[in-house]
Image (cartoon, rainbow, N blue to C red):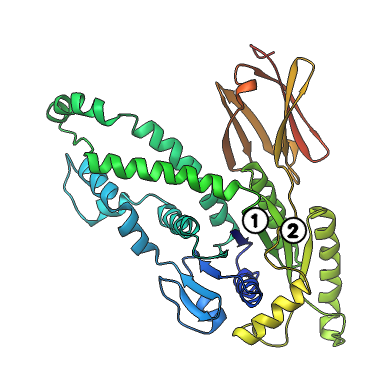
Amino acid sequence: MRIILYTGKGGVGKTSIAAATAVRSAAEGKKTLVVSTDPAHSLGDSFDIKLSNEPMELRENLWAQEIDTIHEVEEGWGVIQKYFTDLFTSKAIKDITTEELTVFPGMEDLLSLLRILKYYKEGRFDVIIIDCAPTGETLALLSFPEMLRWWMEKLFPIKKKALKVVGPIIEPLFKIPMPSNNVLDEIDKMYYELDEMKKVFSDREITSIRIVVNPEKMVVKEAQRSFTYLNIYNFNVDAVVVNRVISDDVTDSYFTVWKDIQKKYKAEITDSFSPIPIYYAPLFETEVVGLPILERLAAEIFKDEDPIAIKYVGRAQEVMKEGNEYILSINMSFVEKEALSLNQKGDELLIKVGNVKRNITLPRTITALSVKKAKFEDNKLKIWFGGQDNE
């Protein structure tokens, strides 16, 4: 199975690109599902049809779906949400505001991904194409499983056997409700599903992320930042799609300045993302709505290529040994040294770039070692580990 996520700045046309890829994939005989996880759904508008919360067959081998996040919360979070509501209201008055507070930010999107994990495990489709929310929300979504997993380990370390012993003591003493077996079962289930999801989305033979850009300054800058952050989280970006490119055949003088601007940023995109393959989609003379023009768009982008083939595989991070030292190398294109900070605590390395941070669990070979130095070489952050104590 193949999973492809399309992301990019809001308004760049990623929904159209995702839909066109799905149309082409289905035409080549692969059972293809295109799913929108963006709360502001526009996938149905792209196909010019009203979609539902379940996969809808549009033609042979092609299904489309707009996930209803409220439904996913009720189905996948209901038991745990009820426990949190009881916990938060054990000494307060229960109202609708409390129930809303028990749905953590990003939870709706996370449960949408769990639905996609379900499809993956069922093997019903050959290809799943995801029309993601704008870049910032997508980055938060992809990092959320790792963060939630960490919180679940900290919040729910109590096992069922231990709970049977301490529960009857803690509950009446502190008047705090203890989680039932059903709650713990749901937490365990989600815990393991998060692990599965992380493995699937990090598997470079299964999952690719494709960044959609327009040849404009702000869009290109955001694409560069998102590429860096995706590398920090070890996801594989296998292609960049430049959308709404004005054709050289357009001779109207009104477009002359715009063509010059696009030419400048097309060159910057090539320089920035090489050796990742770059594809181009033209600015059409009409809106991209309906199956016929989506077919045309796919033909312009992929020509005779397989649209769902893995276009590029690059390692975001690796560990090497030099003498008595180990070097952790992380792809950090477009990062300025001043925006980066590192901290090590036990077997965790905290990397912060601007407002984005990640806790990386270090390999066992370097867990007991300390950071000796760090520097940039060839668009990579290299961190040396070599002693028991920091110098």
For label 2, the residue is 311
* x and y, in percent, of residue 44 in the image: 50, 78
Which residue is located at x 73 percent, y 65 percent? 241
Contact (CB < 8 A) between labels 1 and 2?
Answer: yes
Which residue is located at x 31 percent, y 45 percent? 186
**Along the viewing direction, whichever of 279 and 350 lies nearer the viewer:** 279
Whether residue 282 is visible here, answered yes or no, is no
**Along the viewing direction, whichever of 7 and 325 lies nearer the viewer:** 325
Quadrant position of residue 327: top right
Which residue is located at x 32 percent, y 52 percent? 77
Quadrant position of residue 74: bottom left
* x and y, in percent, of residue 295 in the image: 67, 81
Which residue is located at x 34 percent, y 29 percent? 157
Residue farthest along the left direction in this orientation: 172
* x and y, in percent, of residue 303 in the image: 78, 74
- Residue 313 in the image: above or below residue 243: above
For the C terminus, give its image quadrant.
top right
Q: Secondary structure at mark 1?
A: strand
Disc number placed over residue 188 in the picture, else none: none
Instruction: Name which of mark 1 and mark 2 comes first in the sequence.
Output: 1
Q: How many marks?
A: 2
For label 1, the residue is 208
Rate crowding at label 2 as few (under 14), some (14 to 19) or many (20 or more) other CA atoms within 10 Å.
some
Report the side of 214 relative to 2 (left or right): right
For the N terminus, give its image quadrant.
bottom right
